[in-house]
Amino acid sequence: MERTYLKHIAQHEGREVEIRGWLYNKRSSGKILFLIIRDGTGMIQGVVVKSEVAPEVFEAAKSLTQESSLIVRGTVRKEPRSVGGYELSVSELEIIQIAEEYPITPKEHGVEYLMDRRHLWLRSQKQHAIMLVRNELIKATRKFFDDRDFVLIDAPILTPAAAEGTTTLFETDYFEDKAYLSQTGQLYMEAAAMAFGKVYCFGPTFRAEKSKTRRHLMEFWMIEPEIAFADNEENMRIQEEYVSYLVQHALQNCRRELEILERDTSKLENVVPPFPRISYDEAVEILQKNGSEIQWGEDLGGGDETIIANQFDRPVFVHGYPAEIKAFYFKPHPERPEIVLGSDLLAPEGYGEIIGGGERISDLDLLMQRLKEHNLPEENYQWYLDLRRYGSVPHSGFGLGLERTVSWICGLSHLREAIPFPRLLNRLYP
Ligand code: 4AD
Ligand code: MG
């Protein structure tokens, strides 16, 4: 008898197989037991008929509780009405462990209750589907950048200095010194771009975000490409190509997951290049016409991002933000130094900013001036300044937030379900 995973069950129609997994649910009609079995890769309905199996097999099946672990053997039959499209006529059943009373039942639970049990909640169908979409987006990311000759370079997590402002730093002791958990791999990617041309990193990043919103995590994963000799125009072209690639990949490879999540995929089908582009100036005008309080010079709030995004059927670039509200490394516009050559990409349907990026300052003196203006200690950035001393070139890059992207593609209402174990303002457990 062949051991198989439910993912591949279609290849075993009519044959005897062994499945190892857990009991998801159970129904009984007296002489027949219906076991919904999951094995991590899929689900199947196992049918145990009292008159067709040994009495101990039927008794064992009857004793199974939700999430008990088991090995079943039986014959695979096509059954379009069953979950996954197949059924298993069970002939043998081996119990591995009878589970204690499982705390997550098919009834509704509150989010905090479920988050306290995140280690178990991941087994539930929707959470399971979200993680599979996340996995596919990571696969697609690697393929996208591999196919375009980008080199994956890992950035450090313990860093000596801030890169995205000093208010969201997580500080930790580093022997006699201080270290900060990385807010971004960008500065290291700039070094790597000067060594390899086109690079990217993919890793966890940390921000002590003191506000509680559905768009912020304390720990999130970012994909950060950096390209030597690219300006912000080229940067935006790569972003729209990449984001479209992710969405189309999910539509093709995650059809079942998006169905489980009840995602309206018609809204994702439009996501192809080119994406609309508006300037920050235009954005402020649109927002003021739509009742926002925003004044030129202020950052867009979450509500503002939604108003802008709702004007379009695909993600939209907002470029030319005021230098005042952006990080120290952004290159100023040559004719209007009060704005920068950078852009945010806003996702449709109110999912907000999924990418921030831009052209970096390549001039040594200007960069040193910016560090001063931002009260950043020059000695910690000497290595970064070196990149402007030894063969400085124009370069650009961006960072895509994985959880924001997963959340948008899956149609989730909060970022906390887009990561296996979320770190939130009020949550470090489990
Ligand atoms: O706009 P941000 O802060 O840009 C950077 O960090 C640049 N250094 C990236 C680069 O150019 N290499 O963050 C980039 C993206 C945001 O657009 C958002 O998707 C995500 O990271 N992000 C967060 N996601 C979840 N929780 C948070 N607290 C996030 N902060 C940023
Ligand atoms: Mg940003």
Image (cartoon, grey):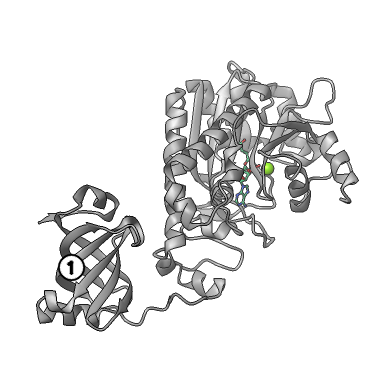
Which amino acid lies under the numbered mark 1 shown in the image of this protein? Val
Decide which of 296, 141 is in the foreground and name it.
Answer: 141
Q: Position of residue 196 (x, y in %)?
A: 47, 22
Q: Quadrant of ligand 1?
A: top right
Q: Which residue is mark 1?
A: 90
Q: Position of 127 compared to 171: left or right?
A: left
* Vertical side of 400 occupied by 341: above or below: above
241 shown above or below 326: above
Q: Position of residue 150 (x, y in %)?
A: 47, 26
Residue 90, image quadrant: bottom left
Residue at horizontal 37 percent and vertical 78 percent from the top: 102
- Left or right: 311 with respect to 136? right
Res 425 visible: yes
Q: Position of residue 302 (x, y in %)?
A: 74, 52
Foreground pick, 82 / 187: 82
Q: Is residue 396 above or below residue 57?
A: above
